[in-house]
Amino acid sequence: MKIKNKSINKLILKLGVIVSFMLLFAVLVLSFIFPYDAFIDLVLQLVNYPSDKRDVLAEMINPSRLLILQGALLFGLLLIGFLFFSFDKVYTYIQKFIYYFLRAVKSVFTDFKTKKALLVLAIPIVSSIYLGLTIPVSYDEAFTFLNFTNKPFYYCMIFYPYPNNHVLHSLLTNITDCIPFLPTLFCLRLTAIISSILAWTIAYSFVKKFYSQKVATFVVGIVSMAFMSVYFNFMARGYGMVTLFFIISLYASYNIIKNDNRTKDWLFFMLSSVLGFYTMPSFLYPFAILNVLILIYNYRNIKKQIVYNVLTIASVILLYAPIMIVDGIKALTGNQFVEPKSRFVVIEALPDFFRETLQDIFGVPFFISIVLILAGCVIAFKNKDKWTMVLWVLFLLAPVILLIAHSVIPFPRTFVYYAFVFIFLIGVSIGRYIEQLPNVVLIIGVIVIQIISFVNFSRQIGALESFNTQSSEINNLVLKEKNKTYYIGPSYINFEFEFISRGYNPQDLTIDTNERISADTIRHQGYVIIDSGNDATVKRKVFFSNGYQNVYIEDEK
């Protein structure tokens, strides 16, 4: 019976490959046969794109980009053709990978189900859910929802107007947004919450396997409550997913080095890297760092490393192809918020950047982080632990070299995964001392640190999220009845999120993005909300102000 089911599954997959080939072939042929205007109309119908947006689509798929689209379709046909003619071999690889994947999942969650693991992961999990339910929506979350989650699912796969589009994260929020009975904001945050739980669960299994249960308790218990970890444990952004895929890639790197260059480990490395890239292009940094680590210890098998890196890059290019066709490659390689600088300027800015990054990661004064990092380094070198010494040198030098080579100073959160890197390296450096602690003392100590970390986060999050908190206060004040009209500008993103998520009529909302707005000239609006710095109102009295925004209400005469 099992053999028959496998044959049916194999036949279905093969038919799927054939159908995919036929669909791509049909679109490619039609792109040559139909006149340009007729082809645009066809695409509109296929993707159910609004007819009133035809000019926008025509601009995006202009004649020159149509040529790129045809090239991409041809590449897709060649790839599917290869899959068809190598189907048996590819199918066998897929079967093996699924088998290895299920075994890995079982192993990870076997470690997770132990009492010690549950004790140290309880506070991170509970706090992520609690914060996900209580912290007001942030600007970036609202922007993600309005521009990618609240659109057809394919929208985030095609358009990359801003780096806020963490594509894989945006895709998954389209799924979680469909969950009934939960608040829209919590549904939006579910992807981040689940990613964080998976990240720390896998991290625990990884450290336990290659070091010990006590070191795993120390490392994961502390890093999961580091300031930036707590923030992205619930915040609906792609940074938690970057940490997850980095940890999986690091786990796979260890397996590649220590388990004789196994193919299954390269498959895990490739898959996690592809998913990391598809979340954020800046995953290039950890991808490069881990490749150097593998090369140092696995240089005799460099051919296999090259093959899997080529497959990784090819997969990433294929996934990003729709975006590159529509918005161009610069949408991915450039960031309007992170402009290239001369290398001399970058070198000069590095000390301040690293100081800010450490403060953001751990939420404590810079010198405390430096002392702990230096202590870990010194202990590793004193113990002549060559493996750990190499890790320290690599992970400390890599950001310096990468940023100078790239000629940019990014946002500190770009290195969000360094929260795990530093705590992990400190943990393995002092591993012999951790092993001397009784389990009860270790667990109590870690839980105390977690509680202190949560208190520290709670004290600092107010200042970090002050604008979002104040916006939420105004939103809750004015969004009490659905028969009112609203006029807002120019900081409208948070308000529009609340407006839509609460089911208000979009026709009752007017958005004004002008730099200067006067409520004196606005009539027949229930509420007028203007940023304090953009408010040119002279005559009308402010109904409510929080320092960021002023609220005016309609005169009741």
Image (tube, grey):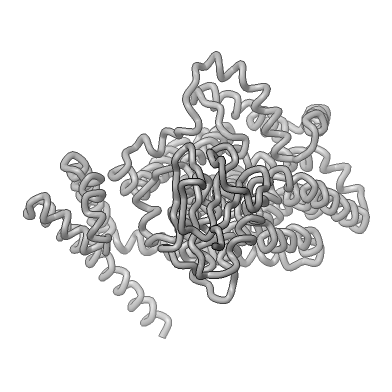
Q: Viewer-proximal residue, 24 or 516?
A: 516
Image quadrant in which the C terminus is located? bottom right
How many marks can you see? 0
Q: Is residue 223 left or right of residue 325?
A: right
Q: Is residue 371 left or right of residue 351?
A: right
Residue 102 in the image: state x and y as whole percent.
55, 66
Residue plotted at (73% across, 47% down): 461
Residue 141 can be seen, yes or no: yes
Quarter-wise, where is residue 162 in the image? top left
Q: Is residue 271 left or right of residue 26?
A: right
Residue 288 in the image: state x and y as whole percent.
52, 35
Residue 255 can be seen, yes or no: no
Residue 511 lies, with reference to residue 103, above or below; the image says: above
Quarter-wise, where is residue 50 in the image? bottom left
Residue plotted at (44% across, 40% down): 514
Residue 23 in the image: state x and y as whole percent.
20, 63
**Seen from this angle, which residue lies furthest top?**
344
Residue plotted at (60% across, 67% down): 480
Residue 128 lies, with reference to residue 455, above or below; the image says: below
Q: Is residue 192 left or right of residue 135?
A: left
Q: Viewer-proximal residue, 556 or 458?
A: 556
Residue 263 in the image: state x and y as whole percent.
48, 51
Residue plotted at (82% across, 43% down): 431
Image quadrant in which the N terminus is located? bottom left
